[in-house]
Amino acid sequence: MKTQDILPVVLSIVVIILVAVFEKHNRLFAALTATMPLGAPLALWIVYSANNGDKAVMSEFSLNLLLGLLPTLAFLVAVWFAARAGMKLGPMILTGYGVWGVGAAILYLLRSTLGLR
């Protein structure tokens, strides 16, 4: 098994444990830990390795990562509104993913307009 296959799983477990520990002491720090960039650096590493660090590929992929944050931000805003509305956890998360899905679909449909592949 390759390091790039194992590392995301190990990091995910560490983050879950840290969030559980920090949540009892400082909710802001727990939230910062939960949202810290883990997937993006791993994805950058994989794409960089697969393309021998090609500048054009890395630039395009980095832009795609940046644009991919928009649906994720919309997910979090939707979850926040759902929590304020008093929804339970399941419906909150489903609402967030519904909004994320719409945002991801819009981004996908606009890819040629934005010059993305």
Image: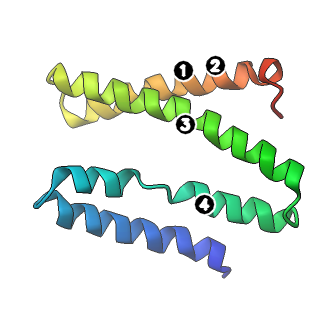
Q: How crowded is mark 3: few (under 14 residues within 10 Å), some or many (20 or more)?
A: some
Residue 34 in view: yes
Tell me, yes or no, whether the two marked residues, 1 and 4, touch with CB atoms within 8 Å.
no
Q: Please, what secondary structure does the residue beneath circle 3 have?
A: helix
What count of labels does the image hold?
4
- Residue under numbered circle 3: 69
Residue 84 drawn above or below residue 21? above
State the image coordinates of residue 112 (x, y, percent, origin top left). Answer: 83, 22
Tell me, yes or no, whether the two marked residues, 2 and 1, touch with CB atoms within 8 Å.
yes
What kind of residue is marked 1?
A: Val
CA distance separating discs 2 and 4: 25 Å
Comes first in the chain, label 2 or label 4: 4
Residue 70 drawn above or below residue 37? above
Comes first in the chain, label 3 or label 1: 3
What kind of residue is marked 4?
A: Pro
- Residue under numbered circle 1: 102
Residue 97 in view: no
Which label belongs to residue 41? 4
Comes first in the chain, label 1 or label 4: 4
Residue sitting nearer the eye, 33 or 82 = 33
Which label belongs to residue 106? 2
